[in-house]
Image: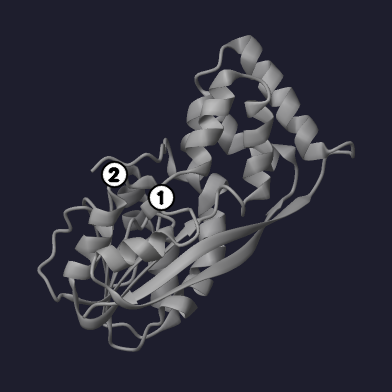
Amino acid sequence: MTSEFVVHNASGYDQLMGRWSRRLAPLFIDFAGIADGERILDVGCGTGSLTFALARAANLGEIAAIDYSPVFVEEALRRNNDPRIRIQQADACALPFEGNTFDRALALLVLHFVPEAGKAVGEMSRVVSSGGVVAATVWDHLGGMPGMRMMIDTVAALSEGGRQLRSRYCFQPMMQPGEMKRTFVDQGLVDITETQLMIRMDYQSFEDYWAPIAAGEGPLGKYVATLDAAERARTDAAVRDAYEAGRPDGARSFANVAWACRGIVP
């Protein structure tokens, strides 16, 4: 498996998405459900937003966390001081665990970056015991992230490269209504529930919003990094204008919606 998420350093990721992952994690845990003593797998743990939220949410017996990125794994290991948590680098499409190892397998904001997302769901199901839960959540890039669409639509108006970026960004795997649920069905899960989770992303200024993207973090940052100096200056100015929307620079708040899906291993 290859991940389509670009990360250069953990602090840049935290400013881009980690802080919002931490805000979404408790909502996702409530949806997925957990109970004291359970063994939980966090697939695509990043810097530990879900992993550490799980540890706070219940007296779990064990939390295993994996991520494909060595940058993320190193940072999650650095942050961990809980003996119940084991973190390692691994592939979501080839999990290094025996079958029936866990009570639940969860994936927070991961599957849309996995080219073979269905295979990853199948692997999550394989390592969960019968009667256990597989659950995942992904952002709704097309219709549920106005703050990011503001940037995407702005660059799409500037160039053909921007239009291609928008097409890729808006139609990543698992993001369309019912798509994740169909994948869960295809992988043999039963009693499947799909819902939506919502948080707000609150920015203090344009710099707070734009800095990690300008530094090349994530798929949007990857695109910005390909621009020449003139294109970059034009893009910076246009996105700033969109953010400010005719008012002085300052705080802005955007609602953001994620699809969430939960199924039972038969």
The image shows residue 247, relative to residue 64, as above or below, that is: above
Q: Where is residue 79 in the image (x, y as percent from the top left)?
A: 39, 59
Q: Position of residue 120 (x, y in %)?
A: 26, 56
Can residue 107 be seen? no
Is 248 or 5 nearer to us in this picture?
A: 5
Q: Residue furthest bottom?
A: 36
Q: Which amino acid does label 1 sit on?
A: His
Q: What residue type is labelled 2?
A: Pro
Q: Mark 2 points at which residue?
A: 70
In the drawing, does residue 89 fall left or right of residue 238?
Answer: left
At x 48% / y 79%, what residue is drawn?
30
In the drawing, does residue 228 fall left or right of residue 241?
Answer: left
Is 92 or 174 nearer to us in this picture?
A: 174
Q: How crowded is mark 2: few (under 14 residues within 10 Å), some or many (20 or more)?
A: some
Image quadrant where one finds the C terminus: bottom left
At x 54% / y 61%, what residue is drawn?
258
In the drawing, does residue 146 fall left or right of residue 36?
Answer: right
In the drawing, does residue 257 fall left or right of residue 137?
Answer: right
At x 51% / y 73%, what residue is drawn?
26
- Residue 237 figure quarter: top right
